[in-house]
Image: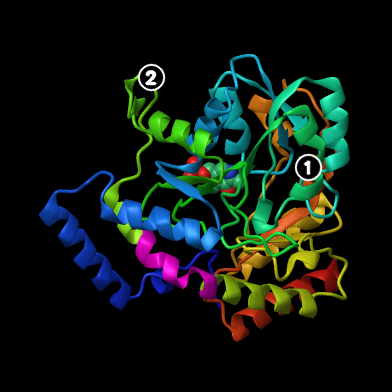
Amino acid sequence: MNITFYDFKQLHPAPFLQEIEARFKEILHESSFIEGKYNLQLEKRLCEYLKSKHCRLLANCTDALEIALVAYDVKPGDYVGVTGISFHASAEAIVNVSAIPVLIDVDPITGLMDPQSLSRMIEKFPLKAIIPVHIYGMPAPMAEIEKICRPKNIKIVEDAAQAIGAYFPDGRPVGSGSNLVTFSFYPTKNLGAFGDAGAILSDDEEMIQKVSYIRNHGRSAQGLLHFGRNSRCDHLQAAVLDLKLGDLEHQNDQRKVVAAKYMEKLQNLAVEFPAKNFVRTSSWHLFPMLVPSKEHKIKLRDFLKERGIQSQLFYERALGDEIPMQQYQGEKEQARKFAERVICLPIHPFINEDQINYVVQSIVEFFDHH
Ligand SMILES: *Cc1c(COP(=O)(O)O)cnc(C)c1O
């Protein structure tokens, strides 16, 4: 049996592609390539869905992170905290604005930012901003993080690239609130374009105004007061995302069902589930599992591959151990241990019962011998 990590064939069935073609034809006919009506419609719908006052579509999430830092007035040489388990773009954005990343350690089980490590790093470094990441789709502990940062006026950029459709424990959607929250619509994300796209959401009108002018070469209602850059979202991508948004909640629910089954069926093995307390609140972009050692991780990956099951080592190394990050300071210990043990199982919305059972049986068999 072959189980792929993503399944674009089922994600894009023929009736969906017909609707997309109709939209593309309409856009070509109107020659409305940039900032078209689907951009505005999608921004409005994302605000409603994520209970946020403002949304601006952008070219991708890495740009969104950089633009958020610039909007918060992060300057070259400023210190910006970032959590140790993430895709490396979270740190790349800091370096790209010539600021200095500081590694904040993670909770050993969830891989989310550890507020105690954050407090220690605030004592050591004059952090101007931090980037907590809702990694794998789990909400980071924002209530605790905000309690620490607000009195010191440390700005917060939430990296929600993997967390569209996730919720905080109080039921508030990730994407709501007054921080700048960044999303990615890279094709493999829960809401994916036919290329690159991203967004920033926030209730903070002043910051969103800044985001607006930065994304469009600095143009503002008062004319050109500052340079910006180009990070606009193509109309074609907005049309795709707007059409796909209607299916997102249902697809996230299907991911949840898969996750719950994996956890139930694998519970007696020597493994731990970072998102076990987030069944209802995660967007389940990924299904991370902690195995006893690095050796188990590599052997399990290869064993599954032989059986036709794709898994992913997200993330093979902690952010602080990636070559371009090794020069930067902070706390890296828990993230390192987490990265050594984590492997992600396939969890796209179209995995069926037989496939789940096949993955489970294969893992059980692996642990019979290891
Ligand atoms: C995908 C991802 C990004 C980068 O998004 P792009 O749209 O590819 O720039 C940033 N952070 C995290 C956590 C991601 O998963």
Does residue 74 show up magenta in the picture?
Answer: no
Taking the image in four quarters, ligand 1 sits in the one at top right
Distance, label 1 to label 2, CA atoms, is 32 Å
Name the one closer to the observer, 1 or 253.
253
Q: What is the span of residues highlighted in magenta in the rendered image?
A: 241-250
Question: In the rendering, at what x and y percent does residue 296 appear?
Answer: 80, 57
Name the one closer to the observer, 39 or 322.
39
Q: State the residue at coordinates (62%, 60%).
A: 173
Q: Residue furthest top?
A: 77
Q: Amino acid at mark 2?
A: Phe
Q: Quadrant of residue 139?
A: bottom right
Q: State the residue at coordinates (48%, 47%).
A: 54
Does residue 246 show up magenta in the picture?
Answer: yes
Packing grade of label 1 (10 A; few <14, some 14-19, many >=20) is: some
The earlier-in-sequence mark between 1 and 2 is 1
* Element on which disc 2 rests: loop
Left or right of 50? Residue 290 is right
Left or right of 63? Residue 1 is right
Question: In the rendering, at what x and y percent does residue 247 appear?
Answer: 45, 72
Question: In the rendering, at what x and y percent does residue 160 appear?
Answer: 60, 49
Give the residue pinned by disc 1: 145
Give the residue pinned by disc 2: 227
**Quarter occupied by the C terminus:** bottom right
Q: Quadrant of residue 2?
A: bottom right
Q: Residue furthest left?
A: 29
Q: State the residue at coordinates (75%, 62%).
A: 169
In the image, residue 61 sits, relative to residue 129, either above or below, namely below
